[in-house]
Image (spheres, grey):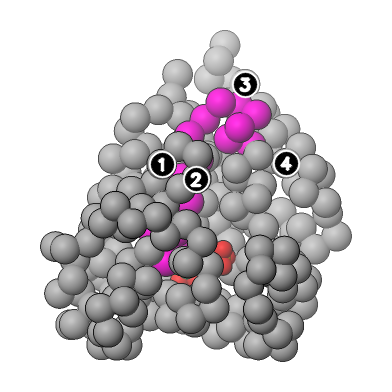
Amino acid sequence: MKISIAIDGPAAAGKSTVAKKVASILGFIYIDTGAMYRAFTYYVLKKGVDPQNEAASCALIPEVKIELLPGGTVLCNNEDVTRVIRDPLVSANVSYIASYKSIRLHLVALQREMAEKGSVVMDGRDIGTYVLPNAEVKIYQIASVETRAVRRYEENIGNGIKCELKQIEEDLRRRDYIDSHRDFAPLKAAVDSVLIDTSFMTVDEVVNAILSIIKRKTAGDRK
Ligand code: CDP
């Protein structure tokens, strides 16, 4: 039986860390949709296009090929962009790109195609509400903005990305605002999602909580 798990929530709530672990434990495919919006943003910046110019950014759709490889490698037109898409400049601009409907429609089509291939754990902003509305399990993962800023700061420092805590917090607040106020497929909890506040939880606690929700929700279907 093919199962889809949707994990949504605001920036740096730890979705991808948890989603990766859950996928690996269950043997499901992990799909990082944020990486796709980031790869598109990287390409826009690389071409010297202003990410706040919707028409010019959308005009690049036909020439952008984004691929997510099984090990987590992200390719943009065959270039390995796995690391560079985490650059603060990409983070600062990605929410503009993600607010453009034609770019979303293009990337959502790819995401749905990937989810057709097998059981998946997909994380993002609109997975439970728009990309996979029939997902068997929907999680909405949150944490206070202060906690999220510290987590992203430590993650960046660990990956050799220079940054300042205050700047990160501002970036998260700005992205959350844009993501939740855009017209098309904004960030919001699906009505049938389970809310998990991870502010005071370790990664393993969140993973275990999600695994038991999956077990509970899919138990009926397996009978
Ligand atoms: O890891 P982080 O929480 O910083 O963000 P991400 O998951 O890499 O997503 C980066 C940005 O892509 C978000 O701030 C959104 O603007 C956009 N995004 C989106 O609009 N829809 C998705 N399904 C995933 C990401």
Q: Secondary structure at mark 2?
A: loop
Q: Nearer the viewer, mark 1 or mark 3?
A: 1
Q: Secondary structure at mark 1?
A: loop
Prevailing SS of the magenta stretch: helix
Examine the image and state in which quarter residue 149 appears: bottom right
Q: Earlier in the sequence, mark 1 or mark 3?
A: 1
Identify residue for label 3. Answer: 219
Q: Is residue 214 above or below residue 107?
A: above
Which of the labelled discs sits on residue 207, or is there none? 4
Is the residue at mark 1 in contact range of ligand 1, meaning its CB lies under 8 Å from it? Answer: no
Q: Position of residue 101 (x, y in %)?
A: 26, 70
Q: Secondary structure at mark 3?
A: helix
Q: Residue at x 62, y 54 (%)?
A: 15
Q: Earlier in the sequence, mark 2 or mark 4?
A: 2
Identify residue for label 1. Answer: 69
Label 4: few (<14), some (14–19) or many (≥20) C-alpha neighbours in 10 Å: many
